[in-house]
Amino acid sequence: MNPAVLRANLAPFERLLEHNRKARIVWAHAGSDILGHWTVDLSRRLLEKHPNLYMSLRMTPGRAPRNHPLTADFRVKAEWLKLLQDFPDHFVIGGDQFIPAASVAGLGPGMTFAQISPRVRGRSRAFLDALPSELARRIGYENAVRIYKLKE
């Protein structure tokens, strides 16, 4: 259940970022803030101040929040494109993906997310396709390999 009142948490988040500059901290679901508080301007300010901050972009299906990177016709908003170009090594594509086993039946959050996962993947593909190719390669693949220290 969600709380009736949300407490401010930006100052503690920045203290976390400052506590250990060697720690890589990835903000999940950037661009999908339904409250509208996490803006491109806030993202820019935090990325300028905290070099250890990274962001995982979520390509929400359905009615996207006003601060989402994509327009309704699958174009990248100009302010988002500028942010991505200014911080090309600090973004990855992300999103919750649920792929249940064939034996799983019934309803529930997992099955609901599984039903929208193809749309999330489709919007992620549309987002990457709308970016300049080098930027798309970084956000779609190379940054994740580097940030998460994956083996190719």
Image (spheres, helix red, strand yellow):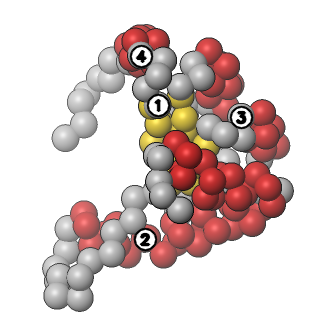
Give whichever of discs 3 and 1 has the lower sequence position. 1
What residue is shown at x 23% (from left), y 88% (from top)? Answer: 102
Q: Is mark 1 on a helix, strand or loop?
A: loop
From the viewer's perspective, is 45 left or right of 107?
Answer: right
Give whichever of discs 3 and 2 has the lower sequence position. 3
Select label 3 or label 2 by which is in front: 3
Q: Mark 3 points at which residue?
A: 87
Question: Which of 34/60 is in front?
Answer: 60
Q: Name the residue under label 1.
A: 24
Q: Is residue 45 above or below residue 80?
A: above
Quarter occupied by residue 112? bottom left
Select label 2 or label 1 by which is in front: 1
Question: How far apart are labels 4 and 3 at the CA level?
Answer: 20 Å
Question: How far apart are labels 3 and 1 at the CA level?
Answer: 15 Å
Give whichever of discs 4 and 3 has the lower sequence position. 4
Quarter occupied by residue 85? top right
Q: Where is residue 1 in the image (x, y as percent from the top left)?
A: 19, 41
On residue 116, the disc is: 2
Q: Is mark 4 on a helix, strand or loop?
A: loop
Select label 3 or label 1 by which is in front: 1
Query: Which residue is outermost to the front?
Result: 151
Question: Which of 40/52 is in front?
Answer: 52
Amino acid bearing label 2: Ile
Q: In this view, does 139 lie above or below 100?
A: above
Check if mark 1's residue and mark 4's residue have beta carbons within 8 Å: no
Question: How far apart are labels 2 and 1 at the CA level?
Answer: 29 Å
Give whichever of discs 4 and 2 has the lower sequence position. 4
On residue 20, the disc is: 4
Callout 2 crowding tier (Cα within 10 Å): few <14, some 14–19, many ≥20: some
Give whichever of discs 2 and 1 has the lower sequence position. 1
